[in-house]
């Protein structure tokens, strides 16, 4: 192992969170929650198996019933949900791991069948996304949203604040605000989905306002050192697009940097789960605008990860799908062992198979 690659296995800090190594488990939606959006007991085993990651970023978890966009995804707004998550965080901590929860509101990437009766998805503007979501009937076109009224935004921000407090009560070491992948906060950022003419639309300053206000509220509630953010400047997933993403995300990161002591920013480079070079983008220019820890994500292997750490560009590297079939991914990367392949048929929904039955090398 060369010295650059070895950096992956050295300790680091992300704000107030001490990590044993620089390998993060990226959030992975698996659609296995119980009724009432309570995490399944199977998730205790699933996350415990992967606790050797320096940081687990748990699956995207809706902050309110209106924030749900997919079948059988968990929430963090009820006492039952908090109690179930506490069993999971206890299991990870018993193995010496660290785990944060990704706070999620899908916005327009939803379907009326997934929402409380009589509700429709909400968004910055009443523009239906060109996309599908996973419902009881399989994949269906998303529903047409309504535009959030200006007077509704303070309650939305409060929902994030309460969800963050609930996450800490559930034993999480912190949270990651999901502002990526074409979901609600990302919809406010981009001029392709945000056609508002009030304080939250139009200029870059206005379109980055909700991101800044949500993250500020969360940081105030649980401490900036336990608050992270996920961004995806150029991914086209969920009909996400902007006419000029570089200045938009440069300014978004500049505003986040004014929140003193923010734990980390987690950036998906390129198209989510695929092409790293789909749209030209200057990621080092983005990174230079933030004083805190930087997590890089998308298409990294041990060699590329080591180079990113050695150059000072990143402080941690996130791996997503490799963690599904390789619960011992850290050990495999350290030893250079081959990686197991995941079964795509078991990614979303189901039970133990394809979830907690992937063997570790020493099995």
Image (cartoon, helix red, strand yellow):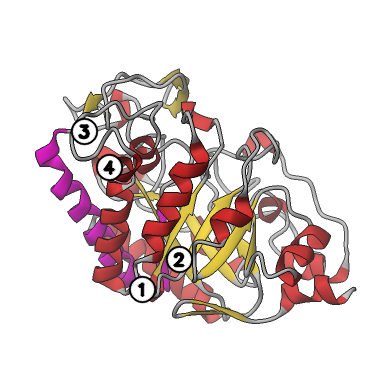
Query: How many residues crowd around disc 4 within 10 Å: few (fewer than 14), some, or many (20 or more)?
Result: some
Q: Which residue is pictured at 39% across the width and 72% down the height?
A: 226
Q: Which residue is mark 1?
A: 260
Spatial distance from mark 4 to mark 3, Cα to Cα?
30 Å
Q: Residue furthest left?
A: 151
Q: Which residue is mark 4?
A: 206
Secondary structure, mark 2, is strand
Location of residue 315 in the rendering, given as x and y in whole percent from the top left corner: 62, 70
The first of marks 4 and 3 along the sequence is 3
Spatial distance from mark 2 to mark 3, Cα to Cα?
27 Å
Q: Which residue is mark 3?
A: 116
Secondary structure, mark 4, is helix
Spatial distance from mark 2 to mark 1, Cα to Cα?
19 Å
Disc on res. 357: none
Q: Between label 2 and label 1, give the one nearer the viewer.
A: 1
Question: Does the segment drawn in magenta span residue 160?
Answer: yes
Q: Between label 2 and label 3, give the one nearer the viewer.
A: 2
Q: Which residue is pictured at 80% across the width and 76% down the height?
A: 6
Q: Is residue 338 above or below residue 191?
A: below
The first of marks 1 and 4 along the sequence is 4
Marks 1 & 4, CB-CB < 8 Å contact = no
Location of residue 349 in the rendering, given as x and y in whole percent from the top left corner: 52, 38
Query: How many residues crowd around disc 2 within 10 Å: few (fewer than 14), some, or many (20 or more)?
Result: many
Q: Which residue is mark 2?
A: 100
Marks 3 & 1, CB-CB < 8 Å contact = no
Which residues, given as a range, are shown in magenta?
149-177
Query: How many residues crowd around disc 1 within 10 Å: few (fewer than 14), some, or many (20 or more)?
Result: some
Q: Is residue 283 above or below residue 265?
A: above
């Amino acid at each position: 192992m060369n010295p650059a690659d070895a950096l992956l296995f050295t300790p680091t800090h992300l704000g107030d969170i001490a990590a044993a190594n620089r390998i993060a488990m990226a959030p992975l939606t698996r659609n296995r929650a119980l009724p009432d959006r309570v995490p399944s007991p199977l998730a205790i085993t699933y996350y415990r198996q992967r606790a050797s990651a320096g940081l687990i970023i748990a699956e995207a978890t809706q902050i309110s019933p209106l924030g749900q966009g997919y079948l059988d995804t968990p929430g963090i707004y009820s006492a039952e949900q908090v109690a179930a998550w506490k069993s999971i965080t206890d299991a990870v901590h018993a193995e010496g791991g660290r785990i944060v929860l990704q706070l999620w509101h899908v916005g327009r990437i939803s379907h009326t069948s997934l929402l409380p009766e009589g509700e429709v998805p909400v968004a910055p503007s009443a523009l239906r996304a060109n996309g599908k979501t996973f419902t009881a009937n399989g994949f269906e076109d998303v529903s047409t949203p309504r535009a959030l009224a200006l007077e509704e935004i303070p309650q939305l921000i409060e929902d994030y604040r309460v969800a963050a407090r609930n996450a800490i009560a559930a034993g999480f070491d912190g949270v990651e605000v999901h502002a990526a992948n074409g979901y609600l906060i990302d919809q406010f950022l981009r001029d392709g989905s945000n056609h508002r003419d009030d304080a939250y639309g139009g200029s870059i300053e206005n379109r980055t306002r909700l991101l800044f206000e949500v993250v500020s509220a969360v940081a105030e509630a649980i401490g900036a050192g336990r608050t992270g953010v996920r961004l995806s400047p150029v991914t086209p997933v969920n009909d996400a697009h902007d006419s000029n993403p570089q200045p938009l995300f440069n300014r978004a990161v500049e505003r986040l940097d004014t929140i003193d002591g923010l734990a980390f920013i987690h950036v998906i480079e390129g198209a989510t789960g695929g092409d790293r070079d789909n749209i030209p983008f200057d990621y080092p220019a983005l990174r230079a605008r933030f004083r805190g820890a930087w997590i890089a994500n998308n298409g990294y292997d041990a060699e590329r990860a080591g180079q990113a750490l050695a150059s000072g560009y990143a402080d941690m590297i996130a791996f997503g799908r490799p963690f599904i079939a390789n619960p011992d991914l850290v050990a495999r990367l350290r030893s250079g062992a081959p990686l197991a392949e995941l079964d795509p048929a078991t990614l979303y929904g189901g039970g133990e198979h394809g979830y907690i039955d992937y063997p570790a090398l020493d099995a």
